[in-house]
Image (tube, rainbow, N blue to C red):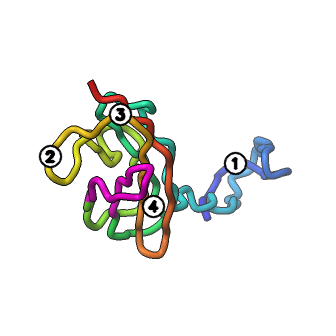
């Protein structure tokens, strides 16, 4: 709970100014983060692609890239990550468009699978390498 001095909460979204110096409490904000794999960007990628995600608690995170036929193309071990949002290029998972052998993949449809603890989520990626 957070303290507000000089305000009275009359409705969840309305605050009225009060002239007294009384201290009241407002409920703590809801948990800001849930485990999620957001849409990769840019999509289609050429060939670099970032895969943004959020975590509600610390987890070991792995991203696996699969071809449309189900072959594992690349595994990205991101290691232990703290709770939070990894939504921009500086923090999101990054794939350079290469397979495990370091070869640039061919154009086509791929799928990225995020694993974080018991959480699993998959997103479709269109890759258009030059």
Tell me which label, 3 or 4, sits earlier in the chain.
Answer: 4
* Distance between the alpha carbons at the discs numbered 3 and 4: 31 Å
Q: Is residue 68 magenta-colored?
A: yes
Tell me which label, 2 or 1, sits earlier in the chain.
Answer: 1
Q: Residue at x 58, y 62 (%)?
A: 31
Give SS at disc 1.
loop
Bounds of the magenta segment? 62-76
What residue is pinned by disc 1?
6
Q: Is residue 49 above or below residue 110?
A: above
Quadrant placement of the N terminus: bottom right
* Distance between the alpha carbons at the discs numbered 4 and 2: 29 Å
Left or right, 51 with respect to 33, comes to left
What residue is pinned by disc 2?
102
Give SS at disc 4.
strand
Looking at the picture, how far across and down is residue 6, in whole percent? Answer: 69, 48
Q: Residue at x 29, y 53 (%)?
A: 73
Q: Nearer the viewer, mark 4 or mark 2?
A: 2
Q: Nearer the viewer, residue 87 or 61?
A: 61
For residue 107, which numbered disc appears in the image?
3
Left or right, 120 with respect to 88, comes to right
Tell me which label, 4 or 2, sits earlier in the chain.
Answer: 4
* Distance between the alpha carbons at the discs numbered 2 and 3: 15 Å
């Amino acid at each position: 709970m957070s303290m507000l001095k000089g305000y009275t909460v009359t409705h969840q979204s309305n605050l009225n100014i009060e002239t007294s110096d009384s201290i009241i409490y407002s409920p703590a904000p809801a948990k800001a983060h849930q485990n999620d794999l957001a849409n990769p960007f840019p999509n289609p990628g050429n060939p670099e692609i970032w895969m943004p995600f959020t975590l509600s608690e610390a987890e070991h995170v792995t991203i696996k890239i699969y071809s449309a036929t189900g072959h594992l193309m690349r595994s990205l071990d991101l290691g232990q990550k703290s709770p939070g949002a990894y939504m921009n290029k500086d923090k999101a998972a990054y794939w350079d468009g290469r397979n495990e052998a370091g070869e640039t993949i061919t154009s086509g449809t791929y799928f990225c699978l995020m694993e974080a603890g018991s959480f699993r989520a998959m997103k479709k990626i269109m890759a258009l390498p030059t």
